[in-house]
């Protein structure tokens, strides 16, 4: 799903506000260590802004806030306590492969898109 999520975000972020790094990459591992987050057993994606990190539902809603279209309206869900939001996040995460499928390959970004991936 991460492959699909990245493509979803890229299509809805024409201002190129969002940059990406695989949590398993050197850069991803450096960021995880910087924020004292686990460097193995990933069960979420992380969004970082102004030296603050967001995980699980908070990361998803933070990203939605910065996309084009109606997606920023979902940010109102931040009013729901994180514990409850994360229950829904984990429910979806647990079923993501059966709902969205699993790809054995990742898309190859164009040179323009490569600039959006932290090295």
Image: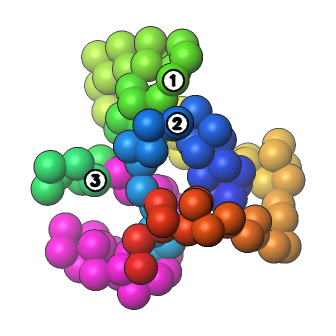
Whether residue 63 is visible here, answered yes or no, is yes
In this rendering, would 70 be left or right of 92?
A: left
Category of crowding for the residue at label 3, using alpha-carbon neighbours closer than 10 angstroms: few (below 14), some (14–19), many (at least 20) = some
Could you say which is closer to the camera, residue 46 or residue 82? 46
User: Are the residues flagged by discs 1 and 2 in contact, CB closer than 8 Å?
Assistant: yes
Quarter of the picture holding the N terminus: bottom right
Mark toward the viewer: 3 or 2: 2
Number of disc labels? 3
What residue range appears in magenta? 24-47
User: Would you place residue 45 above or below residue 105 in this image?
Assistant: above
Judging by the rendered image, the residue that carries numbered circle 2 is 14
Category of crowding for the residue at label 2, using alpha-carbon neighbours closer than 10 angstroms: few (below 14), some (14–19), many (at least 20) = few
Judging by the rendered image, the residue that carries numbered circle 1 is 68
| Residue 33, x across and y down, in percent | 23, 79
Q: What residue is rendered at 81% in x and 46% in y?
A: 100
Judging by the rendered image, the residue that carries numbered circle 3 is 48
Instruction: Determine if the magenta segment contains residue 113.
Output: no
| Residue 30, x across and y down, in percent | 28, 81
In 3D space, how far apart are the residues under numbered discs 1 and 3 (Cα atoms)? Answer: 19 Å
Q: What residue is rendered at 41% in x and 71% in y?
A: 118
Q: What residue is rendered at 43% in x and 19% in y?
A: 72
In terms of secondary structure, where does tag 3 sit?
Answer: strand
Q: What residue is rendered at 36% in x and 14% in y?
A: 76
Quarter of the picture holding the C terminus: bottom left
């Amino acid at each position: 799903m991460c492959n699909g999520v990245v493509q979803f975000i890229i299509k809805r972020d024409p201002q190129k506000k969002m940059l990406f790094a695989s949590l398993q990459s050197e850069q991803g591992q450096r960021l995880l260590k910087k924020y004292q987050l686990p460097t193995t057993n990933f069960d979420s994606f992380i969004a970082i802004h102004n030296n603050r990190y967001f995980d699980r539902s908070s990361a998803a809603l933070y990203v939605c806030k910065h996309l084009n279209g109606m997606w920023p309206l979902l940010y109102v869900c931040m009013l729901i306590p994180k514990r409850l939001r994360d229950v829904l996040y984990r429910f979806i995460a647990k079923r993501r492969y059966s709902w969205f499928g699993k790809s054995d390959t990742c898309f190859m970004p164009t040179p323009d898109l490569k600039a959006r991936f932290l090295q």
